[in-house]
Image (cartoon, rainbow, N blue to C red):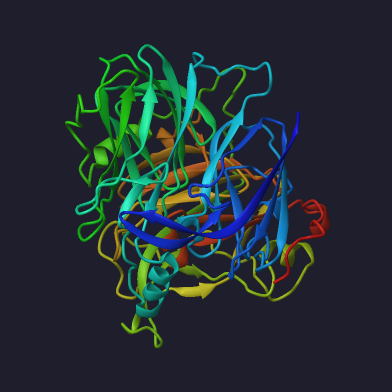
Amino acid sequence: SLVRHYKFGVVLKNTTKLCSTKSVITINGKCPGPTLYAREEDTVIVRVTNHIKQNVTIHWHGIKQIRNGWSDGPAYVTQCPIQPGQSYIYNFTITGQRGTLLWHAHITWLRATVYGAIVILPKLGISYPFPKPDKEKIIILGEWWKSDVEAVLNQATKSGLAPNISDAHTINGHPGPVPGCTSQGYTLHVERGKTYLLRIVNAALNDELFFKIAGHELIVVEADASYVKPFKIDTIFLSPGQTTNVLLTANQGVGKYLIGVTPFMDAPIGFDNLTSFASLRYKGAPPYLKTTLTTIPPLNATPITSGFIDSLRSLNSKDYPARVPLTIDHSLFFAITVGLNPCNECTSGFKLVSAINNITFVLPTIASLLEAHYYNIKGVFTDDFPANPPIVFNYTGTQPANIQTNNGTKLYRLNFNSTVQIVLQGTAMIAPENHPFHLHGFNFFVVGQGLGNFDPDKDPLRFNLIDPVERNTIGVPNGGWAAIRFTADNPGVWFLHCHLEVHTTWGLKTAFLVDNGIGPNESSLPPPNDLPKC
Ligand code: C2O
């Protein structure tokens, strides 16, 4: 195994997209930023230097960071931010995973322009469990606002209401054409007869996205850096934070084909419905389009999303067994709500808030949660996060009269090596929407999902405990539920949150405290000397 060194300079860069120019926060002047390449078992060392006037952290989304929360990155969860003029070295060894992941800033909304792909190749001499592709390509999807993203967030915070939606989706940094501005879209160049492994990443801030190439079938082989049983499909669905690897064979007539990226939004009205386009161009093809997209999934294409999600199964082979916990030590039921709290300083008089079991999570400011745990600093958090909602109601029916939530910095304590099941129940209050939940520090198995209220008597009987998909981010359906299981074999403090940045801002988050019981100092590796101070 190798040690791979990277230098990430956080710098402002004037960038022109959608016919307008603004100064954006980037890594090394690029958006998307550099791709991190490594092999399984390699050590990756990234020196991040902050050259801008605001705080920064970087998260390596999906990297398990065994005993090594100090390199995980979420601000105020595992570290204090890197302040202007300061550097911090992230240092992690990739253990037991290979595939595509992403890295991104993990503080306020900096992820809008500070993101990139992580490619983990199998160990030398180990091949993919699918036919070897001729070439590999990264396709990273994002969102672009013409205005300053921090200003969008500040405006929302001031009013207490929802932020403006983005002006376009981007494909490898290229926004699709929008009225009044013809921009050169991204072109995926292929040669007829060759097979390509597309590593597709959704790095968007707030949008779940469909990805489709006209006239071509895709074979899905991996999700969130876990191999899946290959299956054919024409439309891929990804929540922010999710990755999917597909095989694409250029087996159609030499030509140019449209690629479409369009959001999925099952919310009723007023949401983003912009499709962005790129093209697939065969070598020797004339510049005009051969095939356009005949069908683009409609905004509320729930059957396509659930069809896609249902098709994902762990490979579960001898080399890549699915180690699904069969018994459960901690059984949790998390009801996810979006509500309105009164707000004196907000111009609307109210504030959109989001909660798990009625707790709107508030991050600390004086120390990170992991430091507070490690150094036993009192008063930063409590470990009484509720395992169940305070009141049981029909989660997909009428909302209760009082939908105010309580602020709290409450963690849920898990015993080291215990097994955990969480039923994530989506509710249809105020802003009905899917919630892509992401867990740091672990992969989990998605043992079941469904629409309506979770039925604790009937639904577990249909759980897939053989080959459920293993991932780090799962879309909890609007008015439905998802059940996940994992083994808490990684000591530390691990964030769990909705990967729609707007919902994280509203408080849709909590953290697990995994303690081995010997004492806090045995839980994690010691903090590095350059760990930033708050
Ligand atoms: Cu990709 Cu906590 O995030």
- Compared with 178, 445 (above or below) is above
**Image quarter for residue 277?**
top left
Q: Is any part of residue 484 visible from this angle?
A: yes
Give coordinates of residue 254: x percent, y percent: 27, 16
- Compared with 128, 450 (above or below) is below
Q: Is any part of residue 357 visible from this angle?
A: no
- Compared with 472, 156 (above or below) is below
Residue at horizontal 25%, vertical 23%?
Answer: 286
Residue at horizontal 31%, vertical 22%?
Answer: 217
- Residue 128 placement, left or right of 4: left
- Compared with 446, 291 (above or below) is above
Residue at horizontal 61%, vertical 43%?
Answer: 442
Give coordinates of residue 468: x percent, y percent: 48, 31
Residue at horizontal 31%, vertical 82%?
Answer: 348
Give coordinates of residue 84: x percent, y percent: 65, 68
Residue ranking furthest to the left: 294
- Residue 62 placement, left or right of 378: left
- State which quarter of the image contains the C terminus: bottom right
State how many labels appear. 0
Nearest the viewer among 345 and 214 is 214
Give coordinates of residue 142: x percent, y percent: 40, 48
- Residue 346 placement, left or right of 520: left
Residue ranking furthest to the top: 193
- State which quarter of the image contains the N terminus: top right
